[in-house]
Structure formats: C-alpha cells, structure tokens
Amino acid sequence: MSMHGMSSGEGLGLVLPKNLLVKSLVTTSDTINVSHSILFCRPIPVDVFNCASGALPGTTDCNIYTRDLKDFPLDNLPSGGACAADNRISPSEMCYAFLQLNNYPGSGTITQNWGENTGRGTFVSFSNSIPARSGSYWWSYVWSYIGHFSWEINRPGSYYIDFLTTWGNANIEFTVVDTSCPPMTVTTTII
C-alpha cells in the first residue's frame, strides 16, 4: 500500500539515516538543478514505528534495482508505512524512494509517480507543495513506498518512480522478477 510523506525544516530537528547523504544513486535521468539527494531502498518491515521520534524508517538493499516477488508476501495488510494510522510497515512493501532538496529558490511542488513501463503506466501519484526556504540551511524532503499488492506491483516487469519538481525531474527505473515460478519450457515432438 502506498504511503508518502513530506517535511521541511532548517538546521537540526530531523534525524536522517547516517548513510543518506553518503550514498549516491545513479538514476535513469536526473535534471534537478538544485542540490539534492535521492535514495532508493527496500524498507525494513516493523509492526510499530515511532513516528514522533523524527527518524525515518530503516532501509536495506539501497541502490539495488531488482526486486523478487518471492521475497515479499502478497497483500500483507494492514500497511500504510511510517506515520500512517497503523504505523506499520508491512513485509509486502518492496521499494522506498526518498528525495531531499537543499537550498532551493522559492516555493514549488514535488510529484511522485510510481508506474509500470508496460501496460498500466502510472498507478500511484502523490503531490506535495514545498514552502519557500528561509535560511541558508533550508531543506525539504518527500518519500513514499510501493509494494507487492494486487493494486500496485503485481507481476514481474519494468517499473519506475518519477520525481517531478519545480526545479527539474528525476527518474529511477527498476526491475521486478519472480524466481518462484520457473520459466515454462515448451517441447515440440514431431511424429
């Protein structure tokens, strides 16, 4: 189940994962023309997440662009991600994407589109208004999850997340496989 969030701030007040700004992500395309960080990871499932702590949920397998359906149970509910009403991050959640903008001019918007390259196109979209910065260390970030749910990632294929911002766009493409189903072999017998 998709979940998203957004925050803005100055200086301290947000506890970011220690590896956030160290890891760089090679995106399919990135035209965002202000200082920014992008993270693409697998969220760590938890039954109760303390949203009030200001920390972001734990992640693993960052910058790995293949996910296997067999590793994620189908439709494990409830799920809504961190800071949702249930504060549960389900084992069905496959991908976590995060964008932080730093020292950007003016105010603007960030839209996150999750989709499938063949077939359905965009199937989940979130949009956030980004306030104007006020200070030299002003930042804003957005994040969202996508998972192995019948209405989201429901089959092997090529998927994407697009970050569409006032300051440019970034695209991450990733592949979903299913190794629990061996490929079919067709045998032809000529008589």
Image (cartoon, helix red, strand yellow):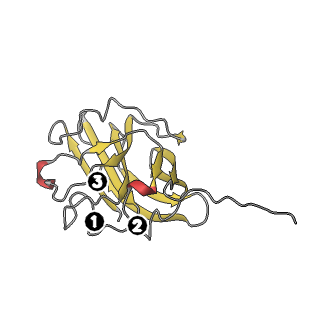
What's under tag 1, amino acid-wise?
A: Ser
Query: Mark 1 highlights which residue?
Result: 79
Instruction: Note whether residue 124 is visible.
Output: yes
Pinpoint residue 100: horizontal percent, then vertical percent. Answer: 33, 42
Q: Residue furthest top?
A: 22
Picture quadrant of residue 184 = bottom right
Query: Mark 2 highlights which residue?
Result: 149
Q: Residue at x 31, y 32 (%)?
A: 21
Pinpoint residue 170: horizontal percent, then vertical percent. Answer: 49, 45
- 83 or 95, nearer to the observer: 95
Tell me the element at label 1: loop
Query: Mark 3 highlights which residue?
Result: 6
The first of marks 1 and 3 along the sequence is 3
Q: Residue at x 25, y 58 (%)?
A: 89
Q: Residue furthest right?
A: 191
Residues tagged 2 and 1 counted as in contact (Cβ below 8 A): yes
> On screen, 8 above or below 112?
above
- 97 or 95, nearer to the observer: 95
